[in-house]
Amino acid sequence: MEGTRVEILHSIKIWIMDPDAPQILWLTGHAGLGKSAIASTVCSRASEDPDIVLGGSFFCSRSAGSIAQRDVRCIVPTLAQLLALKSPEFGKALAGELARDPDVLNKQIAKQVELLLQKPLLALKDSSVQVLFVIDALDECGGPLNTNGTLDNLDGHRIVTAMLESLAAFSRSPVPLPVKFLVTSRPGTDDRGQPVSETAFCKVIQLHAVEPRQVTKDIRLSVSTQLSSTPTLRSWFTVEDADALARLCDGQFLVATTALQYTFGAGMYRAPQRYKTMLETFPDSTGTGTVEPLDHMYALVMDDAATSCEPEVDELPVMLNALVALLTARMTLSISALADLLEMTREDLRASLSRLYAVVHIPESDDDPSLRAFHSSFGDYLLERADDRYRINLSLGDATLASGCLQVMAKQLHFNVSQSRSSYELNMPGRPDSITLALEYACLHWVYHIAQLSAPPSVPDEKSSSRFRQRFLSFIPRTPRLPKSRLDEMVGEIFRPRLLFWLEVMSILGQIRRAAAILVFAAGTVCHLFFL
């Protein structure tokens, strides 16, 4: 919102334009403090500034978009491609590096930074315009999940550190380059003694250490603007109402956003009473800038959702099952697709999730693939800190979606599923209506959910595997063989007879390479029934 975060945005602009400033700015802060909003605003302003070239941005996310948004291997190639589309000089130099080493996409982050950014950027060494790259929520690009379904904090910190160290090495180039990197993440462990702690290479801004009064002032401005946006609202809410919420947010913008969604999501004319009730239930601000106010807001949303369930029907388990499936899904889905995977009607699924309007984005159209949680911290709360009534485990989501994927393939895979005129012709352009989003999800992700139900990942000896196997297994989790179970039987009963139909869908989706990876993985782990 215009007029908020003025000092931080101004300091970032000064850093971008200062040729002598460190090439990395690391913006850290706890969940809900507004890191992504700041990164988005910086991108928006840079794209309109003639003195800055927005080379590219990558917004990592566990709650939105495809699985690629949490894959650290996708970041540097994406940034390089985006700049190549804007700069012919960079694009030509990048093409040369790719010609010399076409396998660079599979290399370590440090090597990607060197070959896809540092060397091609030498073509812009004499440019007078600063090139800015933005990487948001880098800590959400993690490796395997913990047993409770959350990202491993230590693993996330290693990823953040590895990226920052690679960019710091970039900064040591003997040829000065007009390039800056804005990186945001949650706070990590102590980095003293690491190159990223050296002020010559990295400037650090800690959002949780910003003057609390300034943050509260910004939140108050945001809240009061929304509470006074119409004459009706101005007659219902006072300046004191905005002050009260801003004070209780304890510096977390996400608390204010969730509170306003909770207030108005159930209907305009219920808003004043809901706002008053919400303020009355809030604990006093702790002044610590930690997650307590946000947790309270999430608990209030869950209590309200549970209360709104029909008393004669136990709807809470149904709602939690839909919620854990939504949080476990590896790409954003539509109401229609998730309903198919859960074997529910669209109407029942929409009714169940609509109680969570303050924390879940529910698109108006059943076929709009943007169903998702507003913020990844909601999933963290349910997995780690929620009341026992609402606590969830992602293994339930994996079990539900594994079964759902197999059932969808049983119903929707059939002869000539691609509606081709002849098997002797190439695939027709476009995608037939017979390949629904639910079927796409099932074909692409069934093996991942089955794999997650096994023991923790076991990484084989890198030297003992072939280059072919190494490259293809990079798509999928590496886990030991699952014990024989009902899912094994379902794979044998459902998947094996439809293998060729599945390959047909994967071909239409342009995922034949991935299909090979899935079969290599499945043959050695979960699906020995293929070959019986």
Image (cartoon, rainbow, N blue to C red):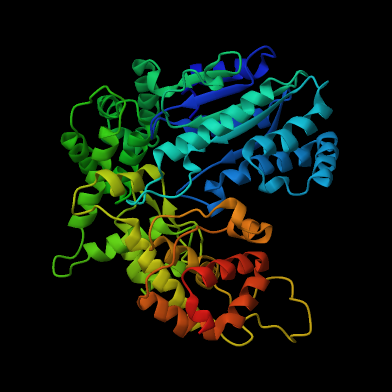
Q: Identify the residue shown where x is 66% and y is 13%.
A: 18
Residue 173 at x, y percent in the picture: 73, 21
Q: In this view, does 462 lie to the left or right of 78?
A: left
Numbered-mark total? 0
Q: In which quarter of the image is residue 413?
A: bottom right
Q: Identify the residue shown where x is 48% and y is 63%.
A: 448
Residue 246 at x, y percent in the picture: 30, 27
Question: From what the image shows, is residue 441 above or below residue 356?
Answer: below
Q: Identify the residue shown where x is 67% and y is 11%.
A: 20
Residue at the left extreme, as displayed: 312
Residue 262 at x, y percent in the picture: 30, 45
Q: Tell me if residue 433 can be seen.
A: no
Question: From what the image shows, is residue 436 above or below residue 293?
Answer: below
Q: Nearer the viewer, residue 240 or 387?
A: 387
Residue at the top extreme, as displayed: 20
Question: From what the image shows, is residue 73 above or below residue 133?
Answer: below
Q: Which of 515 and 324 is in front in this view?
A: 515
Residue 64 at x, y percent in the picture: 49, 50
Q: Which of 518 and 432 is in front in this view?
A: 518
Question: From what the image shows, is residue 192 above or below residue 503?
Answer: above
Q: Which of 391 and 130 is in front in this view?
A: 391
Q: Tell me if residue 251 can be seen.
A: yes
